[in-house]
Each structure stands twice: as structure tokens, then as C-alpha cells.
Image (cartoon, rainbow, N blue to C red):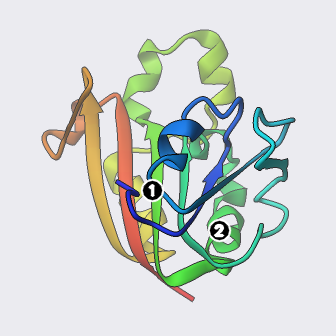
Amino acid sequence: MLQGFGRVLEVGCADCTAAPIVQNVVKFWSGIDLEKPGSFLAHIHDIVDAPFGLNWDAVYALDVLEHIEPTDEDKFFRNINTNLMPHGTVIIGSPSLESQPYATELSRRHHVNCKTAQQMRETLGRHFHNVYLFGMQDMTLHTGFDQMVHYRMAICTGKRC
């Protein structure tokens, strides 16, 4: 989805497993995580506390939003948008609220902010003019019946100032 983009930031990059895939199709990739990331191009940083870097063309955060306290999510998105270019794209991925009864106890303890489709649209709509929401079920990305999806992905453009 980010092929040809210039400067791309991964929020919550962890061990940077997917970084080589993205690095091969963008001009510059960097990542941030709360703990020591697995790449020399990644940094320890908490995006809830402060923005990171300058002039990102795209930012993506997969499996991050569900770990952000609901009271901090607006700060999370404001800090992402601070250094996002006006034409920038943000991709967010998170387990659905509907999937949580089937998650492990450990996952449920750490997933403090899973959302229904409507909640995801409302949250992202406060920070972006355009929100394209998808569901994922059995490795299929779709726009079908949203109450049955295990994972939600959103592509957001048109940051709100």
C-alpha cells in the first residue's frame, strides 16, 4: 500500500520483522517502539508523549491502537498528525472488539482499546477527513459484514489540524 512513498514511519515496530518489506518499496523507513527496536533505523519513543521526526509522507501502526488507553488516543493521533505531511496517509490496524471474547486472557488484559467499526470510524474521523475502513477475516481483507471481522484496518487521509 505504501509503494513509492517517500518518508514512512512505523509506530510500534517491535522487532522490525516487516521493515525489510516496506523498506524495499519506499525511499526512507524509520520505526519507533517503547522498547529497543530491532533495527538501527528504529528508535525508542512513545508517540503518546510527543511527536516523532519530521515530514512523514505516511505513518502506519499495526497492532498498536488496542494498547493505547482510550483517554490517550486523541493525543496518540495528534502526535502522529503533527509531523504528517498535508497529503500524508495513515494506516491503522487493530483487533476488533467483537473478536475479544475469543482472544486469550493475556491478550484481553493488554487490549484496552479494541473497537467496533462505528467506534473506529468515529475515532479516526476526529483526526482525518477521509477514513476507509476494512475488515479482515481468515486472511481476507474486505468491506463486508463488519460485526464478524477479527481485525480492522483503516486507511486515513486528509489530516485534520
On the question of residue 51 being in view, the answer is yes
Residue sitting at 28 percent across and 34 percent down? 136
Above or below residue 48? Residue 126 is: below
| 112 left or right of 151 in image | right
Image disc number at residue 65: none
Q: Residues within 10 Å of mark 1 (few under 14, many from 20)?
A: many
Above or below residue 32? Residue 112 is: above
Q: SS class of the residue under badge 2?
A: helix
Residue sitting at 37 percent across and 46 percent down? 153
The image position of residue 41, as x and y in percent, is: 76, 49
* Residue type at numbered disc 1: Ile
Residue sitting at 56 percent across and 38 percent down? 20
Toward the viewer: 160 or 40?
Answer: 40
Toward the viewer: 119 or 40?
Answer: 40
The image position of residue 31, as x and y in percent, is: 70, 50
Q: Residue under label 2, please give it.
A: 80
The image position of residue 116, as x and y in percent, is: 37, 44
On the question of residue 63 being in view, the answer is no
Q: Residues within 10 Å of mark 2 (few under 14, many from 20)?
A: many
Query: Tags 2 and 1 in contact by the CB under 8 Å rule?
Result: no
Q: Residue under label 1, please give it.
A: 91
In the rendered image, which quarter is residue 50 located in? bottom right
* Residue type at numbered disc 2: Ile
Which quadrant does the C terminus fall into?
bottom right
Residue sitting at 54 percent across and 63 percent down? 27
| 82 left or right of 2 in image | right
